[in-house]
Image (cartoon, rainbow, N blue to C red):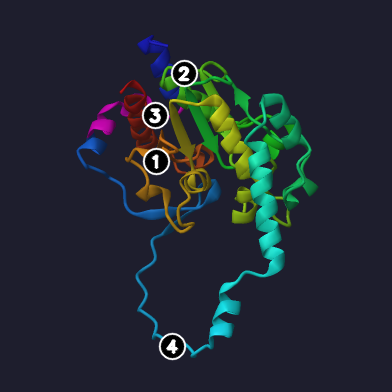
């Protein structure tokens, strides 16, 4: 989509207007940033970076015998069996084609998210897309419709892609870290736990292998940290502006559309991220 008037229409729909321009990508490349360090939590919450704590006193470890040390370093037998089962399952998933993978996801009971879902949300788009957008997990609308990124966050994502000259379903694929909707005890959306994300990761890895995209855009903290296997405490703000790698595929980190709906000032920063993704794609 090369029509500048149509692109400006998408930018206007995103609430950005003329302030969303490629110059922010140049600023990011030059190291100029208007961003204050803070950590992002799921669904748009932000917290300030905590002040460094005083180093705790180091307690002297007890002296162990050789037998005690070996027992302490050896995982319980039950945990070893579970790890072996997970490895076998991941290997099985890694050999699946699209139809096998989608059927397996629809019947998955690997974690507790399956108990409250209406249906799984597999993903949508071109199975040979050059662009892969990865979010966190389905919300209420996605759980009901079985499609990722519908509702207000989905409309914003469509506008983001439109501003890039892209369109949902055409050379793009959209997926999530988990395929079932995570909710709290009050049935409100929440980020998936580390265990839930780990249980679902073989499915996403197989999708990525089958698609073989040119660029991956990780939207939000859960997507970025899961794909990059980073410390859960790492804020998205520290990952932006850099070309990361997922198994040699360039990966760009930006904010989740649901977060942007609550933090409009960060739309400019997201445009800089998308400009970096486009530059990476064209390189």
The region drawn magenta spans 13-26
Compared to 21, does 104 lie above or below?
below
Question: Which badge, 4 or 3, is on the more N-terminal residue?
Answer: 3
Q: Are marks 2 and 4 in contact (CB under 8 Å)?
A: no
Residue 169 in the image: x percent, y percent? 57, 18
Residue 274 in the image: x percent, y percent? 38, 30
Q: Identify residue for label 4.
A: 59
Q: Residue 16: give its label.
A: 3
Left or right side of 58 for 170: right
Compared to 22, does 37 lie above or below?
below
Q: Secondary structure at mark 1?
A: helix
Tag nearer the camera, 4 or 1: 4
Q: Secondary structure at mark 4?
A: loop
Residue 5 in the image: x percent, y percent? 38, 11
The residue shown at (41%, 21%) is 164
Work out how far the residue at label 2 is from the one at label 3, CA to CA, in angstroms: 18 Å
């Amino acid at each position: 989509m090369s029509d500048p008037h149509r692109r400006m229409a998408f930018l206007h729909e995103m609430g950005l207007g003329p302030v969303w321009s490629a110059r922010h990508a140049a600023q990011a490349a030059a190291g100029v940033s208007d961003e204050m360090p803070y950590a992002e939590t799921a669904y748009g919450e932000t917290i300030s970076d905590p002040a460094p704590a005083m180093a705790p006193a180091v307690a002297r470890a007890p002296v162990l015998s050789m037998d005690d040390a070996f027992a302490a370093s050896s995982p319980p037998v039950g945990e070893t069996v579970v790890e072996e089962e997970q490895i076998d399952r991941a290997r099985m998933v890694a050999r699946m084609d699209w139809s096998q993978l989608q059927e397996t996801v629809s019947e998955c009971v690997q974690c507790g998210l399956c108990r409250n879902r209406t249906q799984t949300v597999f993903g949508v788009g071109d199975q040979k897309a050059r662009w892969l957008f990865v979010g966190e997990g389905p919300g209420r609308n996605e759980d009901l419709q079985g499609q990722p990124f519908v509702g207000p966050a989905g409309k914003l994502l469509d506008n983001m892609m439109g501003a890039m000259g892209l369109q949902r379903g055409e050379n793009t694929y959209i997926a999530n870290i988990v395929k079932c909707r995570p909710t709290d005890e009050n049935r409100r959306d929440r980020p998936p736990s580390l265990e839930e994300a780990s249980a679902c990761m073989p499915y996403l890895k197989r999708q990525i292998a089958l698609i073989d995209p040119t660029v991956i855009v990780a939207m939000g903290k859960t997507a970025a940290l899961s794909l990059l296997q980073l410390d859960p405490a790492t804020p998205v703000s520290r990952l932006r502006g850099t070309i990361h790698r997922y198994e040699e595929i360039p990966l760009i980190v930006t904010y989740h559309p649901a977060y942007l709906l609550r933090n409009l000032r960060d739309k400019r920063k997201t445009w800089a991220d998308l400009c970096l993704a486009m530059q990476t794609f064209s390189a």
